[in-house]
Image (cartoon, helix red, strand yellow):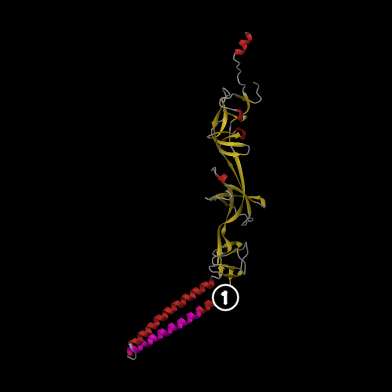
Amino acid sequence: MCAALMLAAPFAQAEAPLPVELFTTKSSTQTLTFSLTGEVVARDTLRASFPSGGRIAQMQVEEGDDVEKGAVLAQMDSVQQAQALRAAQAGLSTAQANHTQAIEDLDRQDTLLERGATTRISRDSAEDALRIAEGALTQANADLDRAQRALDDTTLTAPSKATVIKRLAEPGQVVGAAQPVLELALGRQIDAVFDMPEVLMATPRSIDDIDLSLIDRPDTHFTGTLREVSPLVDAAAGTVAVKITIKETDPFITYGDAIRGTVTVTDAPRITLPYTAMSATVDGPAVWVVDPDTMSVSLRAITVERYETGRIILSDGLEENEQVVARGAQLLYPGRVVRAAGESQ
């Protein structure tokens, strides 16, 4: 009977606390350093071109040359334009002679008419001939101006003081109207252009001075400030073009140089967790939080600001000095009692 009572008696044993790795939360300030490689470019650039097409006869400048306003940059073959100008000059001379003759004829007809030695019809015909000569003279002047402009357009001059960045055409090459033949940098202001990954633009940060250094002269440092951020994202590369104004003018800086930009920013205090603490619910990321009184766990949703190698940075969901399960979360369920791994039961 004693054996039967022993079998009938309920056998109950409390579930032992599950040993897990615990992590105590603490806010810390994150110092982040970003470094990208870009290119030195001119602030203001101009692609110089001939107004009309033709064959380039001469290129008067080389890359890197500094030119003054009005300096000749390139020359196009101008044989046809010179011939057209001479023809226009000859036409103007003829029109001027005809106009002078028409004036004299009209004066003579007026004198004869006063004496009664000619008719009104002859006098009016002389006046009509003068009007025709005046129109021909105006047309000849316009033709001469057009021919002169066409000849002037065969010479490419600098619109202002500039530096030649690139030659886009060579002597003997046939170019079309408005086809660029030279790229010019206007003024001495320079920028550094970087293609920044879009993900770095996701979190707004206050950026002051940016440390810059030339790739081939890493010991030379100067500063720059953020000037412009492109509103468009490169769909292929996933980058955003960022322009940095270079404050100091270094004699070693030239257009097209490779340059490195480094920014160090300090974030506001954030809770940082090891990546192994991450769990999830149907609503998103979560972690297992331990009740310090009962050592039971519950699942709490968190807001992740960003992911880094080996850790996650939170923007919301946890406070300081809370305990979360860093390892062993796959064995947990709400209310499960845990203990720190290594502690005796």
Q: Secondary structure at mark 1?
A: helix
Amino acid type at image mark 1: Val
Residue under label 1: 79
- Tell me where residue 319 appears, x and y as whole percent: 55, 31
Residue extending farthest top: 1
Residue at point 41%, 79% (across, down): 134
- Tell me where residue 112 appears, x and y as whole percent: 35, 89
Residue extending farthest bottom: 117
- Tell me where residue 1 appears, x and y as whole percent: 62, 8
Residue 288 appears in the figure: yes
Numbered label tally: 1
- In this rendering, is residue 179 above or below 129? above
> Which residue occupies the foreground of this view, 42 or 153?
153
Task: Report the magenta stretch's main SS.
Answer: helix
Range of residues picked out in magenta: 88-114
- Quadrant where the C terminus sits is top right
Residue at point 46%, 78% (across, down): 140
328 left or right, relative to 227: right
Quarter of the image for residue 42 reads bottom right
